[in-house]
Image (cartoon, rainbow, N blue to C red):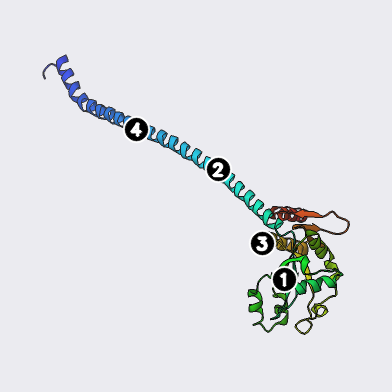
């Protein structure tokens, strides 16, 4: 057996270590590659975070701007509604009068005024006419007489002076017990006569909601004054003006809590 020298041992170790060194080098290269990939991914993630923050800020600013514009639009709607309602300040609407082929709405307004002890003539009336005939046209095809009465198109009258309108409207309680027969139209119907202020479409919808609230919570009074809607629980409580849907929602919430 030959003598084992240091040179042989070194050569033997070198042979044994060579694969290990190769593997370690491969691992080092892989770690280096993965590190570079990680750095690349990390940079991309940071870029995405920056872009996400930018999009978030832009979205937040857009929401703020949308909210601001929505508030402006609602304010403009309120202003337009107020202007339209103000333009109706001399107007009243009369319900319950049947339609005739030869009717004179000015004459009918004057006759209704007479029932309330108000002396009117043509000079007091700026204009009067039926609001619509479509609902009446569909109603007369029905066999139900009550449907026909309820669907009669209202007469709208605009007075020359606001004082005349206010007197006409405030005197409406005197129509209790009066019917169309009292103005010479008994042969067409015998329905009651009712006077209301002329409200904008928006205010009419709000009044409808207030009326539903009144019935649900047993409020005794609901009325309008100069286009504004009021509710009152009873004689011992204060009246409350309802100017928006949020007002009635707030009041409904309070009633549900109590």
Is residue 88 visible from the viewing direction of this image?
yes
Q: Nearer the viewer, mark 2 or mark 1?
A: 1
Mark 1: which secondary structure? strand
Query: Which residue in the structure is indicated by mark 3?
Result: 201
Q: Nearer the viewer, mark 1 or mark 3?
A: 1
Q: Where 103 sits versus 121, above or below?
A: below
Q: Which of the pair 152/28 is nearer the observer? A: 152
- Give whichever of discs 4 and 2 has the lower sequence position: 4
Q: Is residue 191 left or right of 2 when viewed as pictured?
A: right
Q: CA distance from mark 2 to mark 1?
A: 45 Å
Identify the residue at horizontal 20%, vertical 21% (top origin): 13
Mark 3: which secondary structure? helix
Q: Which of the pair 75/118 is nearer the observer? A: 118
Mark 4: which secondary structure? helix
Query: Which residue in the structure is indicated by mark 2?
Result: 65
Q: Position of residue 53 (x, y in %)?
A: 47, 36
Q: Quadrant of residue 248?
A: bottom right
Tag shown at residue 40: 4
- Give whichever of discs 1 and 4 has the lower sequence position: 4
Q: Position of residue 178 (x, y in %)?
A: 84, 75
| Label 1 neighbour load within 10 Å: few <14, some 14-19, many 20+ | many
Tag shown at residue 155: 1
């Amino acid at each position: 057996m030959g003598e084992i020298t240091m040179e042989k041992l070194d050569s033997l170790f070198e042979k044994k270590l060579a694969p290990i060194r190769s593997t370690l080098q491969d691992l080092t290269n892989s770690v280096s590659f993965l590190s570079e990939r990680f750095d690349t991914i990390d940079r991309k993630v940071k870029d995405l975070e920056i872009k996400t923050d930018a999009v978030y800020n832009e979205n937040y600013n857009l929401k703020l701007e949308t909210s601001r514009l929505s508030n402006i639009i609602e304010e403009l709607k309120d202003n337009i509604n107020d202007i339209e309602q103000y333009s109706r300040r001399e107007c009243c609407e009369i319900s319950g009068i049947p339609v005739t082929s030869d009717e004179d709405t000015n004459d009918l307004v004057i006759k209704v005024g007479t029932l309330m002890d108000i002396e009117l003539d043509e000079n007091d009336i700026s204009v009067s006419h039926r609001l619509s005939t479509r609902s009446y046209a569909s109603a007369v095809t029905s066999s139900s007489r009550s449907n026909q009465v309820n669907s009669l198109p209202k007469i709208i009258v605009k007075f020359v002076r606001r004082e005349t309108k206010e007197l006409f409207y405030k005197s409406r309680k005197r129509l209790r017990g009066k019917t169309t027969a009292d103005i010479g139209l008994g042969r067409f119907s015998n329905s009651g006569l009712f006077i209301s202020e002329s409200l904008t479409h928006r205010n009419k919808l709000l009044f409808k909601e207030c009326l539903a609230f009144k019935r649900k919570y047993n409020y005794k009074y609901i009325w309008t004054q100069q286009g504004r809607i009021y509710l009152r629980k009873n004689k011992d409580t204060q009246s409350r003006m309802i100017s928006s849907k949020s007002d009635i929602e707030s009041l409904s919430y309070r009633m549900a809590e109590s």
